Image (spheres, helix red, strand yellow):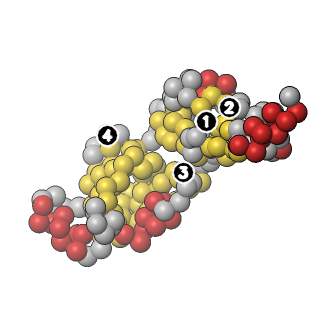
Amino acid sequence: MQKIEIKAVKRVDLGKTATKQLRKEENVPCVLYGGKDVVHFYASENEFRKLIYSPNVYLVTLNVDGSKYDAIIKDAQYHPVSEKMLHADFLQISEDKPITIEIPVKLEGLAEGVKAGGKLQLEQRKLRVKGLAKHVPDELVVNISNLGLGKGIQVGHLTYPNLELLNAKNSVVVSVKLTRAARAAAQQKG
């Protein structure tokens, strides 16, 4: 997994008024769970740009007043109109404790069905996985070279070392749909 560092400041006041003041100053109040103690902190909105507005999954090193914590972002809340980030939850990770996280799917190869005139359809852009942080990859590679017309690859057909896929086994990840042109070509041959 790629790493990113966020510089943050520990929060002293946790009330509604203090939180509103933080947001007014373009800071994002945050909470870190999963460690010995719950850590309340805030960071500038700019610190989150690369983390939030990216399809990649990052291992975050939180630098809260000099104390460093390894974490992953678990949840983020946004303003319904301005879409400004209002709050973020982080989960502290450790070497021996498995984490659950969504990883982007990357397709590899050219499907046989696409060559025959079908349309490739990525049904799930991300898959939920469970594993130790050191085993979690940047992306889950799915080879689609042997995928024919009208066929699909389900979660149950995929395996990755040291990872457990948590999506339903029968849910389709990628498929090749029959287009009207491919259907017409098949009827003319038959």
What residue does disc 1 label?
173
Mark 3 residue type: Val
| Image height of 6 relative to 189, above or below | below
Depth check, mark 2 against mark 1: the one in front is 2
* Residue 157 seen in this snapshot: yes
Percent x, y of residue 75: 36, 49
Depth check, mark 2 against mark 3: the one in front is 2
Residue 57: numbered disc: 3
Q: CA distance from mark 4 to mark 2?
A: 45 Å
Q: Residue at x 32, y 44 (%)?
A: 33
Task: Assign a secondary structure to mark 3.
Answer: loop
Q: Residue at x 51, y 30 (%)?
A: 167
Disc 3 and disc 4 in contact, CB within 8 angstroms: no
Mark 1 residue type: Val
Q: Quadrant of residue 21?
A: bottom left
* Residue 111 seen in this snapshot: no
What residue does disc 2 label?
152
What residue does disc 4 label?
36
Depth check, mark 3 against mark 1: the one in front is 1
| Image height of 57 relative to 162, above or below | below
Disc 3 and disc 1 in contact, CB within 8 angstroms: no
